[in-house]
Image: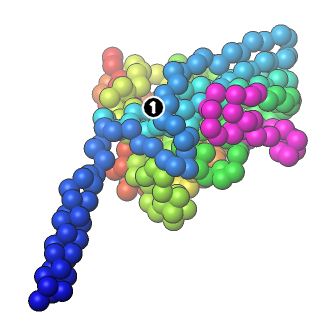
Amino acid sequence: MKKRYMMQLWLLLLIVVVLAGCAITSKKEPNEVSSSATASQTLIDQPPVDPVITRDGDDVYIEMTSQVTNIEISEGEIFNAWTFNGTVPGPVLKVKQGDTIHFTLKNLDPNVPHSMDFHAVHAAPSEKFLDVLPDEEGSFMYPANSPGVFMYHCGTAPMILHVANGMYGVIIVEPELGYPTDDEIDREYTIVQSEWYPYDDYEALENGEPHYVVFNGSAQALTKNPLEAKAGEKIRLYVANAGPNEVSSFHVVGTIMDTVYLDGNPSNVLKGMQTVMLPAGGGAIVEFTVTEAGEYSFLTHQLNHAAKGAIGKIRVTE
């Protein structure tokens, strides 16, 4: 009888412990900062830092930072992101064909090495795109010989983790003789499509669906703050798809893209396009005229991804 009583007591204690454990386990609130054991070990929020860009003739000196900064990826939802200079996407860089780039990366992340991979280069990655350890800096030089709209991103392994955590941006290399349509353009904007996945879920990065697909880092970035134009103006968009995984079917509602330069190269010209396919890591220049006042949406025509945030607006006034 005593043995049976002791077994019942132990069972009761076990149930209490299990219930207590359930009571203290809570789901993360949407506005809490996401963290990760595979990411920086200490949650930090380093303020954005402007890139330092100087020119001496055809030599352009670019100094950027890799750092950890809180980014609002949807209204009220903060992501403790790995970034270039504290923004997602990183700063838009613009140089000219024929420039020589002298690049320096300062790694302000105290926990994780980072690097820079420019798509706009002819260079040996094993010699130029080297990991920069925490609190150190690395430099390399290359000639910007090819014009276009190019992605840049962290190339440190595993690359998918660094890109998915926010380390990407765009460098525009303007053609030596410009684009044939330069004199027709009234306004220019840069748009970067990308994806956000659940933090600290490498399986989701490799095999899952993105939680958000966004323009310029946030699900509301270009709907809450629409691009602006006036009726009759011709707009040029520098568009890139940072991925890391999904294609973009870029489309502007209410107009036709008169001229498209695939990857931003003036030799790659398409006319009268309704939708432009951009692979992950690809880009384009798209140009179109807004003929009437009103709001024009632009989106990826992968409509499940547009529903996850990849939509923006152009507000056109008289």
Q: Quadrant of the C terminus?
A: top left
What x and y, as percent, mark residue 287? Answer: 55, 33
- Which residue is denoted by mark 1 in the rendering? 70
Quadrant the N terminus occupies: bottom left
Considering the numbered disc 1 on the image, is that residue within a helix, a strand or a loop? strand
Q: Please tell me whether residue 110 belongs to the stretch shown in magenta.
A: yes
**Which three-letter amino acid code belongs to the residue tagged 1?**
Asn
Q: Is residue 98 left or right of residue 296?
A: right
Residue placed most toward the observer, 271 or 242: 242
Horizontally, residue 173 falls left or right of residue 141, namely left
Magenta residues (range): 108-137
**Label 1 environment density (alpha carbons within 10 Å; few <14, some 14–19, many ≥20):** many
Query: Residue at the spot x=69%, y=33% of the render?
Result: 134
Relative depth, front residue between 25 and 186? 25
Location of residue 37 in the rendering, given as x and y in whole percent from the top left corner: 52, 49
Residue that appears at 66% across and 53% down: 158
Visible residue check, residue 21: yes
Q: Which picture quadrant has residue 89? A: top right
Q: Chief secondary structure of the magenta span?
A: loop
Count of all numbered marks drawn on residues in the image: 1
Task: Say if residue 306 shows up in the picture.
Answer: no
The answer to whether 304 appears left or right of 60 in the picture is: left
